[in-house]
Image (cartoon, helix red, strand yellow):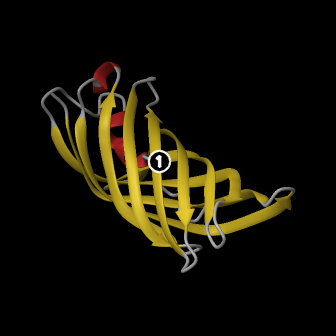
Amino acid sequence: MNRSVAWLGGAVAMLLLPGGALAGEEQTITAFVPWVGQGASFQTGPKDLTFVGSLVGPVYVESDQGPIPSGRMTCPALIKVNENAEQQATGSCVVKGKDGALVFAEITCKGVFLVGCDGEFKITGGTDRFAGVTGGGPVLVRSESRTIAMTADAVGQDQGSGILYLRGLHYKLP
């Protein structure tokens, strides 16, 4: 499940660089978040599964000098998987810049269980120097590992890791 949990909101990273975003600025960036996730999977139908958990990781923005550390992302997420291994995921993310300014975002994506999730990343607001920020772009979420420890009552404790990739993330400050 954690494979598709990938929704997390790391792309707003360039915004998070101190002094990286100015009032009235519009910019398109590429960012990524190597995430670790944990949560629980529940059987929610005869052949359906629902994952509830969170993804957390550092945000990096690509530059001419290579990746630049730009903040930290946390995303609580919900993933539903049907009997055909099709999944739909949603997440609400917060990216915290090194100066404490916050950017909020929503992720929605669809994909294949244990493969990944492709969808949209939508910036919904911010605090401090990011108050009124808008924007968004495509998001790709992939997993590299996943473990499940089954417990009682058809519940599995999940842990996983992967990457969230935001290519072409566009944002605008008022």
Q: Is residue 14 something that shows in the picture?
A: yes
Depth check, front residue: 80 or 4: 80
Query: Image quadrant of residue 149?
Result: bottom right
Task: Tell me which residue sits at (50%, 68%) in the image.
Answer: 87
| 10 Å crowding of disc 1: few (<14), some (14-19), many (20+) | many
- Look at mark 1 in the image and give the residue it sits on: 91
Number of numbered discs overlaid on the protein picture: 1
Spot occupied by residue 7 in the image (x, y as percentages of width and height): 46, 53
**Which three-letter amino acid code belongs to the residue tagged 1?**
Gly
Q: Quadrant of the C terminus?
A: top left
Kind of element beneath mark 1: strand
Task: Tell me which residue sits at (23%, 27%) in the image.
Answer: 132
Depth check, front residue: 127 or 150: 150
Spot occupied by residue 32 in the image (x, y as percentages of width and height): 44, 55
174 sits to left or right of 123: left
Query: Image quadrant of residue 64?
Result: bottom left
Depth check, front residue: 33 or 118: 118
Task: Tell me which residue sits at (54%, 61%) in the image.
Answer: 80
Spot occupied by residue 128 in the image (x, y as percentages of width and height): 33, 19
Task: Tell me which residue sits at (45%, 37%) in the image.
Answer: 95
52 sits to left or right of 10: right
